[in-house]
Image: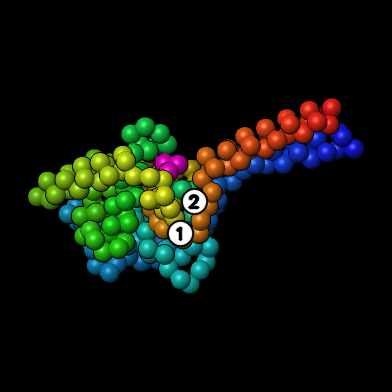
């Protein structure tokens, strides 16, 4: 009985500690259309790119962050969807992570109508790809600087619901574009799950001592 109980607790601990791996889920994306009518200073379509997720008839507006990747209308692919706090194809830590956080806050500003869509999308492209925006470059640079500063001090709660959709096998300059979107479903962050796992480990140790195993 003692051995059975310990095995059950160890199994529960294993699930909690490694559940973070399941935070990235695979979804099917179909690129349906763009608009209404935003064109970036570079002459390319800007937010919103409208997608069907897993065949849904309700379209989800997203923002492209990979200027040098390309897609076509009607194209479908499988993507990993995860919290923007985990980064994406351009990196998962350091400056790349800060860039994703800034991109997420810019997306929210565009989504809420507080930032011009073409200017906001151009700033996100320049964060990751560094393209020049001609006469709009000064405005793009100012927006980037403002939101990099905000991202550096923003709490994790400011990024709740922001997701990155990375096509499986894609990388900068190869494969479908990567997109930023919003999903209101709350998902526990990896740190929360790790903390839970640590707590269970401590509990298992105490119980083990009491049981004399």
Cβ–Cβ under 8 Å for marks 2 and 1: yes
User: Residue 88 lies in magenta, yes or no?
Assistant: yes
Q: Position of residue 166 (x, y in %)?
A: 45, 48
Residue 88, numbered label: none
> What is the secondary structure assignment of the residue under circle 1?
loop
Relative vertical location of residue 180 with respect to residue 96 in this rendering, above or below: below
Q: Look at mark 1 in the image and give the residue it sits on.
A: 183
- Residue 142 visible in the snapshot: yes
Residue beneath the point at 65% across and 41% down: 16
> What is the secondary structure assignment of the residue under circle 2?
strand
Query: What is the quadrant of residue 63 in the picture?
Result: bottom left
Magenta span covers which residues?
85-90
Relative vertical location of residue 77 with respect to residue 193 in this rendering, above or below: below
Left or right: residue 66 compared with residue 87: left
Q: Look at mark 2 in the image and give the residue it sits on.
A: 81
Report the front residue among 198 and 175. Answer: 198
């Amino acid at each position: 009985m003692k051995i059975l109980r310990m095995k059950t607790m160890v199994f529960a601990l294993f699930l909690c500690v490694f559940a973070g791996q399941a935070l990235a889920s695979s979804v099917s994306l179909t690129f349906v259309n763009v608009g209404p009518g935003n064109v970036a200073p570079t002459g390319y379509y800007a937010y919103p790119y409208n997608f069907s997720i897993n065949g849904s008839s309700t379209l989800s507006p997203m923002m492209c962050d990979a200027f040098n990747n390309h897609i076509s209308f009607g194209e479908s692919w499988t993507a990993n969807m995860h919290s923007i706090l985990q980064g994406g194809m351009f990196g998962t830590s350091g400056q790349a992570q800060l860039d994703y956080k800034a991109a997420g806050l810019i997306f929210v500003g565009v989504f809420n109508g507080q930032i011009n869509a073409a200017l906001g999308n151009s700033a996100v492209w320049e964060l990751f790809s560094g393209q020049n925006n001609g006469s709009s470059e000064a405005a793009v640079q100012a927006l980037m600087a403002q939101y990099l500063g905000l991202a550096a001090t923003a709490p994790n709660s400011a990024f709740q619901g922001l997701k990155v959709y990375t096509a499986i096998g894609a990388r900068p300059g190869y494969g479908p574009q990567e997109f930023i979107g919003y999903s209101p479903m709350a998902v526990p962050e990896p740190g929360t799950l790790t903390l839970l796992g640590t707590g269970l480990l401590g509990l298992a140790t105490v119980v083990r001592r009491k049981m004399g195993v």
